Image (cartoon, coloured by chain):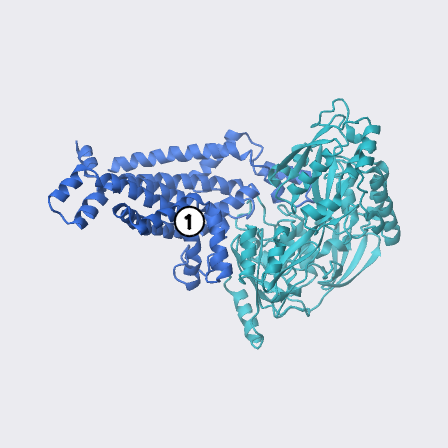
């Protein structure tokens, strides 16, 4: 197990280096950062001197090497726009994104798995059909539109929930949380539903399909033949056997919840990393973009590792294999 | 949240305690962009300067209509053509209690000229400041400078003691040589509002400075600013009643605001002029099917373009009636504006075709147009409209619309003025016509740093001569006559194709009254909550 984790961590470094390399080779196409950093009256000499000081005239490989060396020491540079260390900016945003992703993931699992099981078991029921139809909306409507519709209905028409932002937050060390205030919790509702909807329907449909598959297998028939109660057959035997693919997908989706929170965050002006990143693209704030992309790559690698470890606990066959 | 600890909070708390009978009036607003720094010398950008103008002040201030009125200086007079005497206001205190004196003015000027400052151009307008006594200074300019005062409202004064105490005697640099520059995240000005907390791109909260030296109409005790990037979210937040003001509002959304209860659209002409420019310097256009010559060097071709573009249609169809078509390169708010020259070139496609034929292009020609798509109000749509209007007279325009970072990287000097035909907007930062002339209209001259935004290099030596004279003429009447002459020449030459003044577009709750300044600035001094 230890060597497995160690190998995975080594792999993650390779993945992050690759992402950084690709990111850096693309930055030159994003535009000229200087024009966003100075006013219209600033002279050309000033602009050139700034470009020089930022090292933007250096060859690509030199810029990349410098980034990697500094990043290895945990220094992601200074944001062009905010003139603050990028690591500090990301630190201030990390909690917002993680809380949102966490609530969304919980929502997706807590609603998605039972709904999937239910629609599989009562596949002909009216409620099942209703859920399946609704889920189509979840997978087919773009996140942006769902967010705007929710804002219009619950924020503008009914005025029950805030339309933007994170509400009041409480700081616990560097971590800020919205869980402890009423406005913070209210603010979480719409964005987390928006972000969770796609994953929820995906998990539901996946569980349903797997469950239908497993219910047809021989061992379920034998379990029934043994006279086990339905409850035991469905939840102990069938559901457990559907979980391996569900864990894989959920794991990957959790990564994308964090990575693709960008759209939800910008619709709701949620002050997370995604919003920081999308703003950075508009401003050509290269240090922020680079740090964000590398960090997301890191998240994906870690999540995949956790997923692989979970396989061991869920699927005994894997444990047997590794023993030999 | 970066809560300011210590003295300022104590001062703020005391201020609130003193003002206890006054009702707490919180004013909440959103803007599409963010306050990137609290350092008043860090970036010469209108939102940053407009916002920090509520915290910091210059020797002069903008009034509601952008006319310049005394600020931290009570009065000024010209001693010789290059020296000015300023009498400073007595009894003014910074938010943290320090006294405002001549030393602070001298320090702030030096800081504005320091490495990392984006106000160097303004600082360079002053050669030396001599302190006569604590409340009298003499300012020397490198040359006679009739518009020195115009620069002062945004040349903000910081406290010398405070800056030295916190090691922030240089402006916050974008390259981070001075890591953790204190003034980037903290502020101590003399203005009517004090920064309580500031988290970049998340939220900024300001409290009323109860000891402000001037009587102002505002009854606001607290201002809460949130940047909201997405326009639909901004508009929804206003209609839902969570915010009192949002800007900008897309002109397409005005009807929605009018239909909603308790909010309205507030529109007015911005001091920014949108115009089209043409490459008139290269012997062959970079992006055209005409080889061996440059059609834009021919005045008739430029005039043909001018007569082919229907500014009224752009106003009605693209801008929902909200733009002000213009024939001049500066707006009415700008010092030196000539009302008679503001009539646009007549829309006359027949004349346009005739002019093209005379110039030797009876079947028109092809040219590529560069256009930003996220910089000005409906910028890309304006370019599309121009493209289809020019098609009617036979000119085939290939439109290249890009985000501003890409666009400016291509067409400005850094990109080698890589364009044949482009759309640009300009607000003279001094609110004076000389700035438009010397940046956009005089012949491009890299050594003398003039005409650097004259991307197409329209060049008429007579205009150059006049602009040089305007730059140092202190007699306003003579100066205005020369400005008029220069703009007349540009108009006759068809050096540029002015389009319109774009609209300022704010969404305001009925709960508040605000003053919409022509540079899109929001001055909290005039915000009144009902």
Instruction: Give the quarter of the image for residue B85.
Output: bottom right
Q: Which chain is blue?
A: A
**Residue at far bottom of view:** B21
Name the quadrant of the C terminus of chain A.
top left
On the image, the x and y values in percent for residue B218 come to 64, 68
On the image, the x and y values in percent for residue A190 come to 44, 55
Which residue does the image show at 24% across and 37% down from the upper left?
A: A1
On the rendered structure, is B392 left or right of A256? right
On the image, the x and y values in percent for residue B49 come to 65, 54
Q: Chain of mark 1?
A: A
- Give the SS element for disc 1: helix
Residue topped by disc 1: A195
On the image, the x and y values in percent for residue B253 come to 61, 53
Q: How many marks?
A: 1
Determine whether A55 is above or below B174 in the image: above
Q: Pick the residue in front: B36 or B31.
A: B31
Q: Pick the residue in front: B480 or B495.
A: B495
| Drawing shade for chain B | cyan
Instruction: Give the quarter of the image for residue B290.
Output: top right
On the rendered structure, is B495 left or right of A113? right
């Amino acid at each position: 197990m230890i060597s497995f984790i160690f190998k995975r961590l080594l792999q993650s470094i390779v993945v992050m280096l690759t992402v950084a390399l690709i990111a850096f080779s693309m930055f030159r196409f994003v535009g000229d950062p200087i024009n966003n950093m100075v006013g219209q009256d600033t002279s050309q000499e000033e602009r050139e001197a700034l470009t020089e000081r930022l090292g933007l005239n250096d060859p690509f490989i030199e810029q990349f090497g410098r980034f990697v060396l500094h990043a290895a020491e945990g220094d992601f540079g200074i944001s062009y726009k905010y003139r603050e260390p990028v690591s500090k900016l990301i630190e201030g945003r990390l909690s917002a994104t993680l809380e949102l992703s966490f609530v969304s993931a919980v929502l997706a699992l807590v609603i998605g798995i039972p709904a999937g099981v239910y629609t599989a078991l009562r596949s002909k029921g009216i409620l099942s059909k209703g859920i399946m139809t609704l889920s189509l909306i979840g997978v087919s409507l773009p996140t942006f539109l769902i967010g705007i519709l929710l804002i219009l209905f619950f924020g503008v028409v009914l005025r029950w929930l805030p339309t933007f932002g994170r509400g009041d937050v409480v700081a616990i060390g560097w971590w800020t949380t919205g869980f402890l205030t009423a406005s913070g919790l209210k603010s979480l509702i719409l964005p987390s539903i928006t972000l969770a909807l796609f994953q929820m329907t995906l998990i539901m449909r996946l569980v349903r399909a797997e469950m239908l598959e497993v219910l047809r297998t021989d061992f379920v028939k034998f379990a029934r033949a043994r006279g086990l109660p339905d409850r035991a057959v469905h939840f102990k035997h069938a559901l457990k056997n559907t979980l391996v693919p569900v864990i894989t997908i959920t794991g990957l989706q959790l990564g994308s919840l964090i990575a693709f929170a960008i759209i939800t965050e910008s619709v709701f002006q949620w002050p997370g990393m995604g919003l920081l990143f999308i703003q950075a693209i508009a401003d050509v704030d290269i240090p922020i973009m680079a740090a964000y992309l590398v960090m997301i790559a890191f998240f994906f690698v870690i999540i995949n590792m956790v997923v692989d470890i979970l396989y061991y606990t869920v699927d005994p066959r894997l444990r047997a294999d590794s023993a030999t | 949240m970066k809560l300011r600890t210590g003295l300022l909070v104590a001062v703020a708390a005391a201020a609130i305690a003193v003002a206890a009978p006054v009702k707490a009036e919180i004013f909440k607003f959103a803007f599409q962009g963010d306050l990137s720094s609290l350092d008043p010398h860090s970036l010469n950008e209108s939102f940053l300067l407009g916002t920090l103008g509520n915290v910091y002040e210059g020797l002069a201030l903008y009034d509601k209509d952008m006319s310049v009125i005394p600020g931290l200086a009570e009065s000024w007079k010209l001693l010789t053509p290059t020296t000015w005497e300023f009498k400073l206001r007595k009894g003014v205190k910074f938010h943290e209690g320090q006294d405002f004196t001549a030393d602070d003015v001298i320090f702030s000027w030096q800081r504005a000229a320091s490495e990392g400052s984006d106000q160097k151009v303004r600082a360079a307008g002053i050669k030396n400041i001599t302190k006569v006594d604590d409340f009298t200074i003499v300012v020397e300019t490198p040359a006679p400078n009739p518009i020195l005062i115009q620069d002062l409202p945004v040349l903000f004064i910081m406290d010398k003691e405070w800056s030295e105490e916190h090691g922030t005697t240089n402006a916050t640099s974008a390259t981070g040589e001075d890591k953790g520059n204190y003034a980037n995240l903290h502020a101590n000005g003399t203005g009517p509002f004090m920064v309580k907390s500031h988290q970049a791109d998340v939220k900024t909260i300001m409290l009323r400075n109860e000891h402000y030296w001037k009587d102002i109409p505002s009854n606001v005790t607290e201002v809460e600013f949130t940047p909201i990037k997405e326009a639909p979210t901004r508009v929804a937040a206003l209609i839902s009643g969570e915010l009192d003001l949002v800007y900008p509002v897309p002109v397409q959304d005005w009807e929605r605001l009018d239909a909603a209860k308790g909010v309205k659209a507030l529109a007015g002409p911005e001091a920014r002029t949108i115009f089209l420019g043409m490459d008139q310097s290269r012997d062959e256009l970079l992006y055209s099917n005409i080889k061996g010559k440059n059609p834009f060097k021919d005045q008739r071709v430029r005039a043909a373009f001018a007569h082919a573009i229907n500014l009224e249609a752009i106003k009605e169809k693209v801008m929902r009636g909200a733009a002000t078509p213009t024939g001049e390169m500066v707006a009415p708010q700008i010092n030196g504006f000539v009302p008679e020259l503001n009539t646009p070139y007549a829309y006359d496609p027949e004349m346009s075709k005739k002019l093209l034929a005379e110039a030797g292009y009876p079947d028109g020609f092809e040219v590529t147009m560069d256009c930003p798509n996220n910089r000005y109000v409906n910028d890309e749509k304006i370019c599309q409209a121009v493209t289809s209007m020019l098609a009617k007279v036979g000119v085939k325009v290939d439109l290249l619309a890009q985000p501003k970072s890409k666009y400016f990287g291509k067409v400005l000097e850094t990109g080698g003025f890589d364009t044949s035909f482009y759309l640009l907007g300009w607000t003279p930062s001094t609110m004076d016509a000389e700035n438009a002339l010397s940046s956009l209209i005089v012949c491009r001259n890299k050594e003398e740093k003039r005409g650097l935004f004259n991307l197409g290099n329209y060049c008429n030596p007579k205009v150059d001569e006049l602009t040089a004279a305007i730059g140092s003429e202190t007699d306003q009447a003579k100066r205005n006559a020369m400005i008029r002459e220069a703009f007349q020449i540009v108009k006759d030459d068809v050096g540029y194709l002015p389009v319109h003044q774009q609209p300022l577009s704010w969404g305001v709750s009925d709960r508040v009254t605000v003053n919409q300044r022509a540079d899109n600035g929001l001055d909290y001094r005039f915000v009144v909550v009902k």
